[in-house]
Image (cartoon, rainbow, N blue to C red):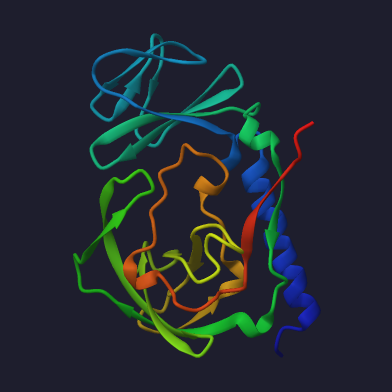
């Protein structure tokens, strides 16, 4: 039996609430106040006690070490080891971040079952890679998972996807970007069965972390994912509280 409209909307509303929790939690996406690139030379970081330096991929403080992928709670703030290629940064997430306090909601289009499309996944060749330019201008080489071909508003698109088959990542823009919606958005897909038909639920398009804090280094859409049609589905923009 197909999912009813009510069930569809309830499922989307639950997803939206989960997104809000992910963004606005004390150490959620909107709480990032700094991404500090480190070196073997000790340096101080505003708002964080002590000095910090790199030992290989580990971040070392005066009486602690944060291994690659790890994090530490210090004075209510989370200090996180973030690695990009051979560079390592200390990320600071602060519950009192102005960016977190400013988030009132995430504006989104009403969910529409007609925007759950059928796509076709084609895996890339083994060891295939793609260069993605990030929002700070850095170019990072990522493993290419393949492409997803889907028809959107009567136009066929072949989207580049990265990540594992259980969590394929699409970075895309469309003709609403920078106007009705944020400058680009993300979409997560599943292709557990490998090559073949997969669901492309545009209602689950979501804002990248850099929409909530200026200290993220999100990838920009590759040329192939810059759509020439509107995608009026999913999250649109951050709704911010008015200044007191």
The percent coordinates of residue 192 (x first, y second) are: 43, 74
Q: Identify which residue, 59 or 183, lies in the foreground.
A: 183
For residue 200, above or below residue 36: below
Viewer-nearest residue: 137 or 43: 137
Quarter location, residue 243: top right
Residue 200's x, y, as percent?
Answer: 52, 77
The residue depicted at 63 percent of the width and 56 percent of the height is 237
Residue at point 57%, 60% (across, down): 206
Query: Where residue 219 appears, x then y in whole percent?
Result: 38, 53
From this viewpoint, which residue is outermost toward the front?
Answer: 179
The image shows residue 207, relative to residue 244, as above or below, that is below
Identify the residue shown where x is 72% and y is 55%.
17
Quarter of the rendering occupied by the C terminus: top right
How many numbered markers are drawn? 0
Residue drawn where x is 28% and y is 65% of the image: 144
Q: Is residue 199 left or right of residue 37?
A: right
* Viewer-closest of 167 and 208: 208
Pick the quarter of the image with the N terminus.
bottom right
Q: Is residue 60 above or below residue 181?
A: above
| Relative to 115, residue 235 above or below | above
State which quadrant residue 191 falls in. Answer: bottom left
Q: Position of residue 197 (x, y in %)?
A: 44, 86
Q: Is residue 211 left or right of residue 242?
A: left
């Amino acid at each position: 039996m197909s999912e009813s409209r009510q069930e569809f909307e309830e499922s989307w509303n639950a997803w939206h609430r989960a997104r809000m929790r992910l963004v606005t939690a004390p150490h959620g996406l909107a709480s990032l106040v700094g991404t500090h690139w480190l070196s073997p030379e000790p340096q101080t970081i505003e708002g964080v006690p002590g000095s910090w330096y790199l030992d290989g991929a580990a971040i070392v403080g005066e009486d602690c070490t944060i291994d690659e992928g790890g994090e530490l709670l210090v004075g209510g703030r989370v200090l996180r080891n973030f690695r990009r290629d051979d560079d390592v940064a200390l990320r600071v997430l602060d519950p009192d971040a102005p960016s977190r306090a400013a988030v009132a909601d995430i504006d989104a289009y009403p969910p529409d079952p007609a925007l759950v499309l059928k796509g076709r996944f084609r895996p890339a060749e083994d060891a295939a890679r793609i260069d993605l330019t990030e929002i700070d201008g850095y170019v990072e080489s990522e493993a290419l998972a393949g492409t997803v071909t889907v028809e959107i508003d009567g136009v066929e698109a072949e989207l580049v996807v990265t990540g594992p088959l259980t969590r394929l990542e699409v970075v895309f823009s469309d003709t609403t970007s920078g106007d009705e919606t944020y400058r680009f958005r993300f979409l997560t897909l599943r292709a557990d069965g490998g090559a073949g038909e997969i669901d492309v639920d545009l209602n689950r398009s979501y804002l990248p972390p850099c929409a909530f804090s200026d200290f993220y280094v999100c990838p920009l859409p590759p040329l192939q994912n810059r759509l020439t049609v509107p995608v009026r589905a999913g999250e649109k923009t951050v709704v911010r509280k008015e200044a007191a």
